[in-house]
Image: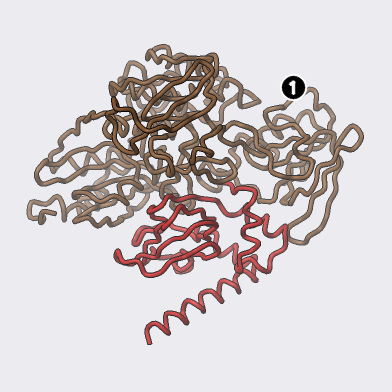
Amino acid sequence: MLVGSGPGGLQLSYSLSRMGIDHAVLSEDPAPGGMFRRWPVFQRMLSWTKPFTGVPHTSRMYERYDWNSLVPDDDAHRAVMPALMDGTSYFPSRPEMQKGLETFAERTGIHIRYGCRWESTKAIPSSARGGGQGGGQEFVLTTSDGEYRAQVVVFAVGVAQPYRPPILGLDAVPHYGDFRPVESYKDHRVFIVGKQNSGFEIATGLLPWARQLVLASPGATKLSVNTHTLVGVRARYVQPYEDAALAGGVIILDTTIEEVRKDGAGFLVKTRNATDGRELAMVADDVIAATGFVSPLRDLPALGVATFGQSRLPAQTPFWESAAIPGIFFAGTITQGAAGLKKHGIPSNSGAVQGYRYNARVLARHLAETHFGVRTPRPQLKPAEVVPYLLNELSRGPELWHQRSYLTRVIQLDRDRGITDEGILPLAHFIDTGGPDAVAVALESNGQGDPYPAVYLRKAGVVSEHLLAPHPLLDFSGTDYERQLGEILDPVLSPSASPA
Amino acid sequence: MAVRDDVVNTIAAFSLFADLTGPQLEEVAHLFDETFFGDGERILRQGVSGSGFYIILEGTAAIRVNGVDRTSLKAGDYFGEISCLLGEVPVADIVAATPLRCLVLPAAQLEGFLTAHPKVMYRLLQGEARKLKNTTKWLS
């Protein structure tokens, strides 16, 4: 059972079908697209699809440059997005994104029961007909269209339910999702609570309309161009920041908001500075809560699903299974709740399409192998092929580029079965789970310079980490890298290496 | 991951933050990320780079050296500061002994945080002195 028809649900349904796994998909929406059927409010995506790359659109390697298409296993359905964008921007418009998702669903024959609302969830002892492993229970989903039963349920229900922090009076102001047509803010003083992308998106759109814009929250603004990650305000929305820096009229405050009070036709907002404790009160015609979103998990927390953080994300294992209730899995942007190693504090891209589309594919294979008795092929490699293959994946493999320090390419070096490509796996799973001699490669970033390859070698059950240098052209296929990787792998690849 | 809004109340009771005002506690809550680990999951990994400074909000964790559990940590305790301060990989695993909720700050931000909050730095120093004293006692 899969709930949700946004990009995460579509990708998982597609990948499950390719594994031959029968499943049902329910969605309360009337059509595919999830959040992108409405948002972003200014109708343009933050993720790009670069049309000209020197790589054919029909190749897997093109996915590195196309953050918005879902990822098929066959070339015929690749790169849906660049073909339907109008060329005016490398950020697709929201309608183009919606069209892309609809097109993928239609072309690949994804079948969804639309207009079927998941209402509640029960766990009951597994019935005798079961063949699955694990907890010995199954789940009953009550929906607007009757009851559904399954041993494995996957929720891909997004993180788009408006959230307001408990600030006095904030519950009475509109949220990001309630934004009115821009004209209605003409000559208004607008106070935006929140300094994340949603707040800066609104501020950017209001620059030509508002009389004054104030953005306020306790934490300092981070910019993605400084963090070298998706953490922080994206370049597209930095204009209000420049306006504030050049004293043009936008005001950006690092401050606690103590109260929002209705005052005549407008609002009075009371703030207090963390550093000097100074109080500041401001009058505004409009206050907008750009204060984030939570995951609409309905009764899952009552069932025992542990959640954490402001977004109330479910805590998950490296394979996106609830850390508390086995058998409940997640797909789509909710998978950011499986943080992985989060090296140097940098999150994965599991919150975004270009990251979670690969999580869904890895999850489909994991479910197929652990719950449905499917064994997917492991291609064999010759010893001399290992180094060039891994360096090519590090230079061009889209899974490694989009999910740094999170997804990894694993090669198993088993004496009896030979050298096998185990495919893409969660890096945390590889490092924390024992097994035969193997090597895993990932791309990593430390938030400062360029990304660099990381090699994790498992020999006799012990994992060692080896970091390689970055390359100014991001190409790791040269002789220097061949030599370095060769030296790291020598203890397990050379004919004289001792068996594990 | 941004923190849950009740985190300010939780950390107000921790000795590390005993000298901070309400708005300063909120600032701390916005600077740190919240993270969750299932029972048995590793948080710090011996020999693996890129870890951070962790403060336990809920649950307990074990310090595991070469596979042997040495001691346990509870809410209000912190770990990872040694590898952050020295810029080296952790010399022990930290493993969740129950479901574990933590605050985390990346290593690169610890210096800026501590120098901006000298009282927190002093409390951390007291904590390190206590650890050193215990180790010295144990060795003697």
Amino acid at pointer 1: Pro
Residue found at the very far bottom of the displayed protein: B140
Q: Position of residue A83 (x, y in %)?
A: 45, 16
Q: Is residue B60 visible?
A: yes
Q: Quadrant of residue A210?
A: top right
Q: Which residue is mark 1?
A: A181
Q: Secondary structure at mark 1?
A: loop
Q: Quadrant of the N terminus of chain A?
A: top left
| Residue located at (22% from left, 42% from top) | A411
Describe residue A405's horizontal placement relative to residue A287 as left or right.
left
- What colour has chain A? brown
The picture quadrant where one finds residue A312 is top right
User: Residue B23: x and y, percent?
Assistant: 72, 57
Q: Is residue A109 left or right of residue A430?
A: right
Q: Is residue A276 above or below residue B118?
A: above
Would you say B110 lies left or right of B9 here?
left
Please tell me which residue lies in front, A476 or B128. Answer: B128
For the image shown, how many numbered marks are present on the structure? Answer: 1
In terms of image quadrants, where is residue A339? top left
- Kindly indicate which chain is depicted in red in the rendered structure: B
- Residue B116 placement (x, y as % from top left): 64, 65
Residue at x 59% of width, y 63% of height: B112
In screen coordinates, is A470 left or right of A233?
A: left
